Amino acid sequence: MCGIVGYIGKHAAAPVILDGLSKLEYRGYDSAGMAVFDGKHIQIRKSAGRLKVLEELTHGGATMPGNIGVGHTRWATHGAPSDINSHPHYNAEETIAVVHNGIIENYLPLKEKLVSKGYTFVSDTDTEVLAHLIDYYYKGNPLEAITKVMHRVQGSYALGILFAEHPDQIFAVRKDSPLIVGQNEDGCFIASDVPAILKYTRKVYFIQNQEVVRLRADHMHFYTVDEEEITKEPVTIEWDANAAEKGGYAHFMLKEMYEQPKTVTDTLSPRIKDKDIVIEELGMTEEEIKAIHKIFIVACGSAYHAGVTGKYVIEGIARIPVEVDVASEFRYRNPILEEGTMVIVISQSGETADTLAALRESQQLGHKVLGIVNVVGSSIAREADNVMYTWAGPEIAVATTKAYSAQLIALYLLAIKFGKVRGKLDEVAFYRMLEDLKRLPAQIEMLLANKQRIQRFANRYIGAKDVFFIGRGTDFAISMEGSLKLKEISYIHSEAYAAGELKHGTISLIEKGTLVAAVVTQDALFQKTLSNMVEVKARGAFVLAVTNEGNTEIEKAADYVIYIPRTNQYFTNSLAIIPLQLFGYYVAVGKGCDVDKPRNLAKSVTVE
Ligand code: M6R
């Protein structure tokens, strides 16, 4: 939520900041702003709306000369998306400017205290409190003022701060919201995420909680909240800079869907060695794997849906009981984590506030946590006891596709590994599963090649009011994800139901022509779901079926069928999701929606 970029160096700051913000707009896009020191004053330009409004306002940054500045794209929390609530925020004298990502939880008492001391506020934001509070403690030493503020504010924050009296420095601060800094021969940078500065440098420093950085044009100094100077080691980012560009595709989402064969291969192949599954980063001995009594999987959104698939797959293959929790529920429900419980958290960004809190809650209860994470060096990756990376590379579209697919692979690998170690899989079944896994990338490619047929079908539904997704077992898990993909980007109301549950209320919503998408890949449940399809068809539904090749019997209950290649029953979600992603995508495109940046959403949800 919210993206921050800062630059100090030989070049004009504003164009560098605008360029960096364009890579971070996925983090929030309801308003944008910049503060640049022009040699005499800190100039601020900001505006509600997308980044392009700010670009136009500043003529691409040309109207904001100066070599030092900070910028921001916002996802509103406190105060509506408006010009005045946009960041940066000033102190009264306009000598301090602040950009902020996160939430200041105690901003109201702080605001009251500042008002009682004569400070006036112009915005509804929590961030403005920071600008005035820094001003209140500032007596000529920026570091001292900042650390005093850090001791007094509660909540989460990544900050970029300018002081007019120190025009050769930017300050960057972090607590529970992501922030990195980097350097090249032309200057120093701050950013919320790597893609913003990847074009300029690959050497980045991950700022830890309660750390402060003083950036000058040619060097950076790191401090603790107690103003002690510390040293930090840079991390070299290996990503391909083009990975964060659209590369000729109409949208990042389409590009990322097309990257799924590679993502699956990259997540899979380093862990298949000598016809065995080797997950070194698991950090568990065979004895420890045998001692697992129960697994909790905790995540949000699509990562939660991957977890639901994981439950079916791990229980089915390894015969270990699995509970899956939405992270925002898990953290407040006083979960019972007994001896022998393994906790797995799943997150693409590695920054999701509720998932991070669930991780910490589990650790406090004395349990080690395995993180399945995409973003290298993210908060969850750093705090989890062990990290299994999904090698999906940067994912920019707000609607996840390739990271979700990689999460499924990580969960299959764990299930098979655990199943083998615990003696639940014989050699033949084990090798067959490995072979089926290796075939998935080519099968996904085949499904992607079918995109035109799905596009034509999707075009019929751009006017739909409601769409229902049904399935049983893993097919229910993938229905949840298919439904989320459609609704989050096309704004069409959609729900996913366990196919057998529909008649307990929801079936009353089915009208003539309502689209019901039935996922039917589990052979053992085929006839059961077929009956549910007949039930909705009898009430006027138009039934789309996604099923395995050869299941032509389905045609008697379905109006339209998408066949997926055959694979192991536990891996079908990796294939069934492809047409569902394409369907959601093309409905949204047909409606003219902003596919990569759906309204009200942000890629990285760093607030509760
Ligand atoms: O970064 P995370 O995987 O922790 O994010 C979790 C959810 O916010 C995310 O999956 C969200 O539901 C996506 N918009 C789904 O496409």
Image (spheres, helix red, strand yellow):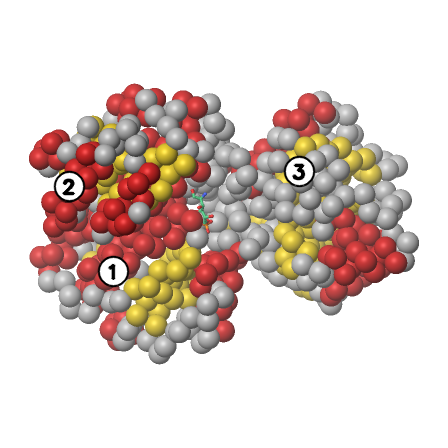
Residue 174 spot, x, y in % from top left: 65, 56
What crowding class fits label 2: few (fewer than 14 Cα within 10 Å), some (14-19), or many (20 or more)?
A: many
**Sequence-first tag of 3 and 1:** 3
| Pointer 3 residue | 81
Residue ID at (59%, 33%) = 22
Residue 339 spot, x, y in % from top left: 35, 78
In the structure shown, which secondary structural element does the residue marked by tag 3 occupy? loop
Report the side of 493 relative to 572 (left or right). right
Relative to 149, does residue 401 appear above or below in the rendering? above
Report the side of 534 relative to 348 (left or right). left
Depth check, front residue: 436 or 52: 52
Q: CA distance from mark 1 to mark 2?
A: 26 Å
Residue 410 visible in the snapshot: no
Residue ID at (36%, 45%) = 404
Report the side of 557 relative to 181 (left or right). left
In the structure shown, which secondary structural element does the residue marked by tag 2 occupy? helix
Depth check, front residue: 396 or 555: 555
Q: Nearer the viewer, mark 3 or mark 1?
A: 3
Dividing the picture into quadrants, the one containing residue 295 is bottom left
**Kind of residue at disc 1:** Ile
Depth check, front residue: 278 or 573: 573
| Pointer 1 residue | 314
Q: Residue furthest bottom?
A: 339
Q: CA distance from mark 2 to mark 3?
A: 47 Å
Quarter of the figure that contains the C terminus: bottom right
| Pointer 2 residue | 530
What crowding class fits label 1: few (fewer than 14 Cα within 10 Å), some (14-19), or many (20 or more)?
A: many
Residue ID at (60%, 50%) = 180
What crowding class fits label 3: few (fewer than 14 Cα within 10 Å), some (14-19), or many (20 or more)?
A: some
**Kind of residue at disc 2:** Leu
**Sequence-first tag of 2 and 3:** 3
Dividing the picture into quadrants, the one containing residue 154 is bottom right
